[in-house]
Image: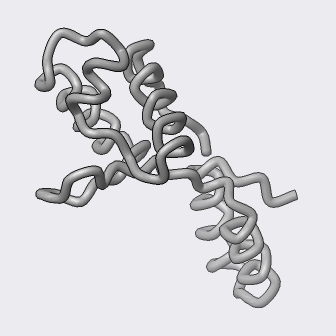
Amino acid sequence: MKMQKITKKQQAVLNFLEDFTEENGYSPSYREIMTGLGLSSVSAVAEHIDNMVSKGILKKVPGAARSLEVLDFRHTETVELFKNRLGECTEEEKKVLMKAAEILGLDLE
């Protein structure tokens, strides 16, 4: 995925989220992120999370605890889906799919 520009603190939050989730099997709470990164407040964590959600880097379920998920469009299943569809579509559809793949940062070669 072509990562949108994120701040150093957002990258730190993202790294912490990925590491914590891999180690524990669930995402951290905002308070755990705050403590783990030495941030000043839970609202600072919430601001970083909300900005990354709006950039399409993270997904969360509103009102649900520990629902943060890092979005990654490089999965082989996604690439294969695009490749399969490209093999059976019209030229106009191909243009749209190629543009979508470019936006998502998919390597279709």
User: Is residue 32 shown left or right of residue 41?
Assistant: right
Residue at 30% of width from left, 10% of height from top? Answer: 38
The residue at 34%/40% (across/down) is 28
Q: Residue furthest front?
A: 24
Q: Quadrant of the N terminus?
A: top right
Specify the quadrant of the image occupied by residue 100: bottom right
What residue is shown at x 60% (from left), y 39% (from top)?
A: 2
Q: Quadrant of the C terminus?
A: bottom right
Residue 53 placement (x, y as % from top left): 31, 44
Q: Quadrant of residue 83?
A: bottom right
Horizontal relation, residue 47 to residue 101: left or right: left
| Residue 83 vertical placement versus 107 (above, below) | below
* Coordinates of residue 43 in the picture (x, y in percent): 11, 24
The chosen color scheme is one colour
Q: Give the answer, above or below, for where 39 lies relative to 14.
A: above
Residue 14 or residue 56, whichever sits in front: 14
Up-down relation of residue 34 to residue 40 (above or below): below
Residue 30 is left or right of residue 52, and the answer is: left
Considering depth in this image, is 67 or 49 the residue closer to the camera?
Answer: 67
- Residue 13 in the image: above or below residue 24: above
Decide which of 94, 56 is in the foreground and name it.
56
Number of callouts: 0
Most extreme residue toward the bottom is: 88
Can you give x and y, in whole percent of width and height, for residue 22 in the image? Answer: 55, 44
Q: Which residue lies at the image location 75% right of the left edge and 64% below the top edge?
A: 76
Residue 30 x/y as whole percent: 23, 33
